[in-house]
Amino acid sequence: MRPVPGAEKMKKPKKTAKPKKTAKPKKTAKRLQPRTEAAVVAERAAAERAAAAAEASRRARHLKALSRTSGAERELEELVFGDSLNAGEDELLQCLAGPQRFNATERKSLQKDSSDSEVENQAKSKFLPKKPAWVDEDDEAEENVDMTHRYRKDFMKSDAEKMLTKKKLKRRLEEQFQRAMGGVPAWADLENRKKSKRTASDSDSDEDDDLLCRTGNFISYSESLPRGILKLRTCLPANQERFADGRLVTVQFHPSAQVVMTAGHDRSVSLFQVDGIRNPRIQSIYLEGFPIHKACFSVDGEQVIATGAHHKMFFVYDMMSGNIIPIQKVRGVEERFIRNFEVSSDGSLMLLTGTSGYLHLLSMKTKELISTMKINGRCTACAFTSDSSKIYSYSKEGEVFIWDVRSRKCLHKFEDEGSLEGKCIAISKNDQYVACGSASGVVNLYTTDVCLKESHPKPVKAIMNLVTSATCVTFNPTTEILAVASCETDEAVKLVHIPSYTVFSNFPVFRRKQIYLAQSMDFSPRSGFFSVANNKGKALLFRLKHYSDF
């Protein structure tokens, strides 16, 4: 042991000047004696052993508590901490520390392993699929389709193609769709969609640079019809090769073929091929002693129904067989004259407008009476919805009745705002709008959802461009144009741009008499042409340049 510090001072000789003083007692020297290093080390070791024992007991209590937990709690802990509950402390700390960091050599080895796994996956994907256990020979045989059916005859290019395989019919349908759409749409082109997905990330960064590196017109052409000026071209009249001798009461385009029909008081119904240049005549039929009041195509385009001005009978012209079938009397319909009628959009029903508010619903196939409905007052005009589920009837008193076709019950009734006498009514092809024309010349435009709920709806637009009675209203197939006309004044035809509810300023041509008294109007199936029948026996034809197809 080292000598105790301070011991030498205690053993020094006493000074002569102070003989009476003595050294400090040994008891005081013993209290100041410090601990040795061995004692300190021993105490630290004992403290560490006590701490280790306490930690071991704590772990034992924790493991005992974990053993009492439910299976759901153990699964949750395994999801959070991994499968380290039964592992040692080092593995648990490693899981809590996060992902490991590798050096360059370890990273290369991992990349090599991952590439090997990708190669294995590609090799697995190239395995040949299993062969079917049984094959039906009839499935492999090509099935022929009858092209003479009325819904498929328009796809025939010649009379020899009365039978086509399903593949050829599918190709014909694709070609027709592409002609109507102006090409293959982006959503239908699978290859371009895959390429666009791959290059989307690369093109996003390049588009901004291209936009800033060039100058010019960045406004592209819109597919919707613009307002203000309507681009159109005046063609030769549709019935150029045979004008009517008197007033032309009906002009209508064929629902599927590029054909237009005209009918008038000269007792004739004529069909013309529409090409915008010559419009050659196809056929004309003459109904002796039967001035025509109205004529209309059936929905399939195979028949023409014509009613007379002073007769209670009507004619049906079958264009496929060439027969003219007179319907002398409909059993159950007691009317002096049958003039106005409508054909449902699905082609199954025909609605006759009778006197004293009676509406007679007929079967289009048998021309027999199905049911009769009645409104208050006198009915002046009717219209079917596009799904043929409802009928809108317009009374002379300015009230509109909405009927359910299936139950033949009145669903709702509303009053046309400001109408003193109803004249005409039309429903858009998408069932969004209802147009009501009155004797004052005002045409009120409503939305159908408001008409079905309110008894006094407010029109979204009141068209006041006519100064005489509105006698004819019609929508184009895309519901972008509403044509309104009056037969009491020359040039009283207006085309309304539906999205903006504004009138096209360039139609009709200013200071040039061309239309005279408009009797009937119609748009072609894809709005490419617009025709107006006048009192001079002409069916005026206009080419709407915005629409590319017939």
Image: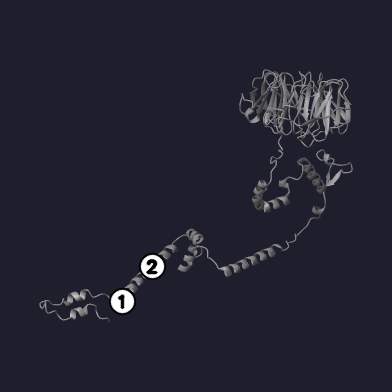
Q: Position of residue 509 (x, y in %)?
A: 77, 25
Which residue of the protein is positioned furthest toward the front in this rendering?
17
Residue positioned 51% across, 64% down in the render: 83
Q: What's under tag 1, amino acid-wise?
A: Glu
| Foreground disc of the pair 2, 1 | 1
Q: Name the residue under label 2.
A: 55
Looking at the image, tell me whether mark 2 or mark 1 is earlier in sequence order.
Answer: 1
* Quadrant that contains the N terminus: bottom left
Residue positioned 87% across, 44% down in the render: 161
**Is residue 87 something that shows in the picture?**
no
User: Image quadrant of residue 388?
Assistant: top right
Which residue of the protein is positioned furthest toward the left in this rendering?
20
Q: What's under tag 2, amino acid-wise?
A: Glu
Q: Nearer the viewer, residue 245 or 340?
A: 245
SS type, badge 1: helix
Above or below, 384 against 354 in this view is below
Q: Name the residue under label 1.
A: 37
**In this picture, residue 428 sits left or right of residue 114:** right
**Is residue 320 something that shows in the picture?**
yes
